[in-house]
Image: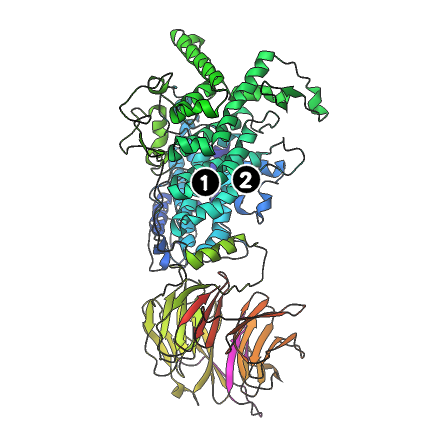
Amino acid sequence: MDEEPAASSGLGLPDYTSGVSFHDQADLPETEDFQAGLYVAESPQPQEAEAVSLGRLSDKSSTSEASLGEERTADDGGAPVDKNSLRSGDSSQDLKQSEGSEEEEEEEEGCVVVEEEGEQEEVTGASELTLSDTVLSMETVVASGTRGDREEEEEPLTVESEGKEQKILLDTTCKMVRWLSAKLGPTVASRHVARNLLRLLTTCYVGPTRQQFMVSSGENPPLSVGNIYQKRPVLGDIVSGPVLSCLLHIAHLYGEPVLTYQYLPYISYLVAPGSNSNPSRLNSRKEAGLLAAVTLTQKIIVYLSDTTLMDILPRISHEVLLPVLSFLTSLVTGFPSGAQARTVLCMKTISLIALICLRIGQEMVQQHLSEPVAIFFQVFSQLHELRQQDLQLDPKGCDEGQLPEVAFSDGQRQPVDPGLLDELQKVFTLEMAYMIYVSFSCLLGDIIRKIVPNHELVGELAELYLESINTSSHNPASMEPTVPSTDLEWDPQRSGGSSQDDGHSGTFGSVLIGNRIQIPNDSQPENPGALDPISGMGGGGLGCESEDNALKRELPRSAHGLSGNWLAYWQYEIGVSQQDAHFHFHQIRLQSFPGHSGAVKCVAPLSSEDFFLSGSKDRTVRLWPLYNYGDGTSETVPRLIYAQHRKSVFYVGQLEAPQYVVSCDGAVHVWDPFTGKTLRTVESSDSRGPLTAVAVVPAPHTSITMASSDSTLRFVDCRKPGLQHEFRLGGGLNPGLIRSLAVSPSGRSVVAGFSSGFMVLLDTRTGLVLRGWPAHEGDILQIKAVEGSVLVSSSSDHSLTVWKELEQKPMHHYKSASDPIHTFDVYGSEVVTGTVANKIGVCSLLEPPSQATTKLSSENFRGTLTSLALLPTKRHLLLGSDNGVIRLLA
């Protein structure tokens, strides 16, 4: 336990920075700098000063919509966890990993890294979502506990500086995850962030080291210390602190449905019995999954409203509690980590059931939780009978796959694994019987006699434990170390034997209100005892008293909480397989963007998909936020209005490299989307004729290509004055006006579509025309260039054609029956099309060709469709209409 963290901390933490440690960055030569990165290093800087600067950088805020997730959770903090834990691409791998891969996972400890499957989101600003406090990492905790045992020549300053680096890195990572959760929206955050965090939570409990109790000086606190609201955290609880914090932050952002529709089903998946014919064997991943599931369920219960809790209580009982108890009390299922893991799971389960009992009251416990409580108590009777009978079970039966069966006094015959009896007896001791009996006697009162048939036996075992404590108190030398006590630690003077009358109708200062036990806010433990050092770690962590002692906490209401159409669409999306690469259009209205007084001519989402631009006949360009609000009927106001155009705006786009906006009304305007300030204007008088088409060259280029009425193609670099290049495309032909331009994703070629249906492919590096061909019989309406040298063009002849750049024959040819496809966008290997008849189609770019069409309902879309844009990451459609309203549909 002590060797691994020490080894990792002495290597300069290379794993935490993907191959470049903080020490390496601090010692960069003078010729290298990171002007676009974290800092500029003209000379070697002290390590501590750099770490402080990194911490300050992570606290900077930006004007982005990251502030939408400003709700803060109360249990921030934790420790680094395995960096490989998020590489699982399929949820089925969670519980089916081999033992060898699990052991490799346990040997490495890294930072919390969230990998989005198939998509990479670039963080362009710092987050306003800050962690209140961050607890020390697991390595720092272990190092502080063993520092006195280390050799004297080791420098303490190195350990302290490494601890600071780990804390800064963990804090920054948590901020990044929170910022992404707000930036990506509910569907993407749930599919790619929350799913991976849930998988990572299991990894936090893998291995015997993560299942050790965190106590000071290596001593078990006395039984008389603490009360029901205090918990004994294990090392995995400390490590999982940041993961739980991020999971709860997502729930704060998008509301209670995240807890009930995403987290709870995943918990049910973790605790579900194996599908194998021999479910008696657990692996270390399944063992850790049980601990993670119970821990997360405790967090969920605290934040659920009373109504929701009562609605899902049967699910919690049958899908969570009963499966966990089946593993916990099984006489044939062994835990890879032995009695320690089973003890930790037992104590967490006691804490969970007690929490539910306090929330719902005695009557509801009798109605909904009778079976789980009875099963919990039954194992003591079974072990007691086995001890009394002193059965000599034949261990050879296990080798042959035939477990001996034992008939118990309740008439049941159950198989028993003789090799597990010792493990079970170490867990379900007299001390555990005392804990369970006193806990549930105080919680349930006389109801315990109705729902627990063997309560008298467990009470006798509890009395035996009290007698042993009294005997050993007279003879301290005879005391033997016992299994660590439960999360629910009781004071015998207040709760042992017969509970004293404290003037209240409940126990421990609680008040019975209806069918619920209400705990006063001022009820605090008189003496936290040995738990106090843990409680002080990183305020807001799992050891935080105010968080762990809470029976109910209000989930802050966010403006982005899911409801109505947003909730229905989110529920569908989280159930879709991540391997599904098709675009599904369900015609669900999510948001409306009114404001233009004229027809919307063009819409273009920014690369981050948190804002989009729209150009209209009203001579304005508007910048709109794309964060979810309301139930699908809400209307959003623009964040910025650019009103410097003199004519109708027919093109708008973004230069990704400098983050500028390019819009055109016959003259090109380059302006800053953050301030609305015009940076440059290219007037039509600068060329030989008015501009008819514009396109921007993809990053990292900063050029704009413009076509004029004389069939001349010009390139302008927004960083330099004047023209960059000029090419004449018409030649000796008369192909007409250039209606549309498209630049390849690499920026190496540009294709121009003419009003005659002619298309020309130009090499931007040499200026040579690579190809010219008659592509359509009517005007070219729109062209898109796709990865793989693929071109997609639509024409007024009602056709949509897919081309390879240098091939003569088209790859696919689609024909619209009634109306031309005047607007379309590309999603992966599919083309989403729109017509003036308000029909949305999906066409395939691959073999075999396929086409599906949906008519927009008047309820979801009014007016005539004029423009269309696709959000590829969020899989939403932006539809502009001739009445000036833009709608977001899915």
**Of residues 843 and 164, the one drawn nearer to the viewer in this rendering:** 843
Q: Amino acid at mark 1?
A: Pro
> What residue would you read off at disc 2?
270
In percent of width and height, residue 572 lies at 51, 55
> What residue would you read off at disc 1?
80
Q: Residue 410, located in which quarter of the rendered image?
A: top right
- Taking the spot 51% from the left edge, 21% from the top edge, the residue there is 428
Q: Is residue 405 magenta?
A: no
* Secondary structure at numbered mark 2: helix
- What is the magenta range? 722-751
Q: Amino acid at mark 2?
A: Leu
Q: Is residue 617 left or right of residue 270?
A: left
- Taking the spot 33% from the left edge, 37% from the top edge, the residue there is 539
Q: Is residue 485 visible?
A: no
Q: Is residue 740 magenta?
A: yes
Q: CA distance from mark 2 to mark 1?
A: 22 Å
Q: Is residue 851 left or right of residue 204?
A: right
Task: Specify the color scheme.
Answer: rainbow
In percent of width and height, residue 89 lies at 57, 49
Mark 2 vs 1: CB contact within 8 A: no
